[in-house]
Image (spheres, rainbow, N blue to C red):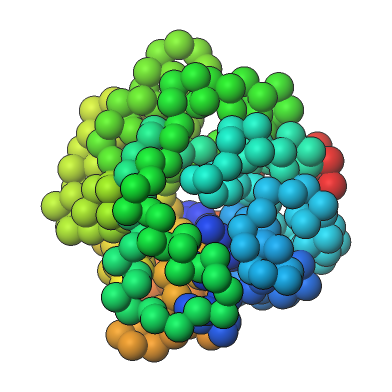
Amino acid sequence: MATQRKVIITCAVTGAIHTPSMSPHLPVTAEEIAEAALAAAEAGAAVLHLHARDPETGKPSQEPELFRPFLGAIKEKSDAVINITTGGSPHMTVEERMRPAMTFKPELASLNMGSMNFGLFPMLQRFSEFQHDWERQHLENSRDLVFKNTYKDIETILRLGTENGTRFEFECYDISHLYNLAHFMDRGLVQSPPFIQSVFGILGGIGPNPEDLMHMRRTADRLFGTNYQWSILGAGRNQMPLATMGASMGSNVRVGLEDSLWLGPGRLAESNAAQVSRIRLILEALDLQIATPNDAREMLGLKGADQVAF
């Protein structure tokens, strides 16, 4: 009897894209983030991708002391793999973005594989009322914003992370990002197998069409053969359809309120766990096995939860 393929579910609990005004269910405080993350892990997420926010304003922050309370709370009650952002916000320097990963030395950290336009301003067509002044400005400013990740920036992040034994979730928003990753692998700066998170549906990156997903897959196969772990991130309403399509083709999946606030057409997701439960139901209907945190550690070649600094 053939064994079931194991699929890693990553849950991106909160992030820099959406603002607190967009959904009452977006976790903001350390207590809310920890509670949301633990519920997502209980629902089946093996990897928890985490940002921090200022508890007063909801503004994204890379201040390590805002990460510390929820990291400790999550580790105390779950063995899920912790994936700390090095993205933070496009308005931050590389040094600012790296502070949490350097402080806490996680098993896994995210890394955007190139500079790009990052257009959030279309959200202004959907959302008009905001709690905080920074929220509207945050979206409007993306009309004239380049998320900067030069080759030097990527080299710096790879070097610092590798020194701490941290591996990376390589976020690839376009075909060129796959070629950038291959470049760093050729130079020996990236360990094999890479964990490639293909991101679809962000204005400035590749589109959310099935043909786009196929193009990303074909290119990754050409560059990396079979020696990589692939995952799918569909932004907004593309989350579940693209994750389902990718999983049927051999990918892992990523869901969470960082990437989409929705559970269905016009229906806000009441929690990260609700999205994890939905994709888990789909994966199990495809006769796929849900990877445990320890499965994920083995599949991604991680150093282990006992080697982190939190």
| Quarter of the image where the N terminus is located | bottom left
Q: Which is nearer the eye, 64 or 233?
A: 64
Report the side of 133 relative to 42 (left or right): left
Left of 13 or right of it: where is 248? left
On the image, the x and y values in percent for residue 193 come to: 48, 30
Quadrant hosting residue 97? top right
Q: Is residue 182 visible?
A: yes
Name the residue at 78% across, 41% down.
104
Q: Is residue 65 above or below residue 35?
A: above
Residue farthest left in this picture? 211
Q: Where residue 147 appears, x then y in whole percent?
A: 42, 41
Tally of marks: 0
Say which residue appears at 54% left-offset and 49% top-offset.
89
Above or below — where is 182 with respect to 32? above
- Residue situated furthest bottom in the rendering: 267
> Quick check: 200 left or right of 102?
left
Above-or-below relation of 23 to 72: below
Q: Residue 45 location in percent, x, y?
A: 58, 64
Q: Does any portion of residue 250 appear in the rendered image? A: no
**Residue 299 found in image quarter:** top right
Rendered residue at 38%/54% (across/down): 142
Q: Is residue 296 left or right of residue 220?
A: right
Residue beneath the point at 62% across and 63% down: 59
Q: Position of residue 102 (x, y in %)?
A: 74, 34
**Residue at the top extreme, as displayed:** 187
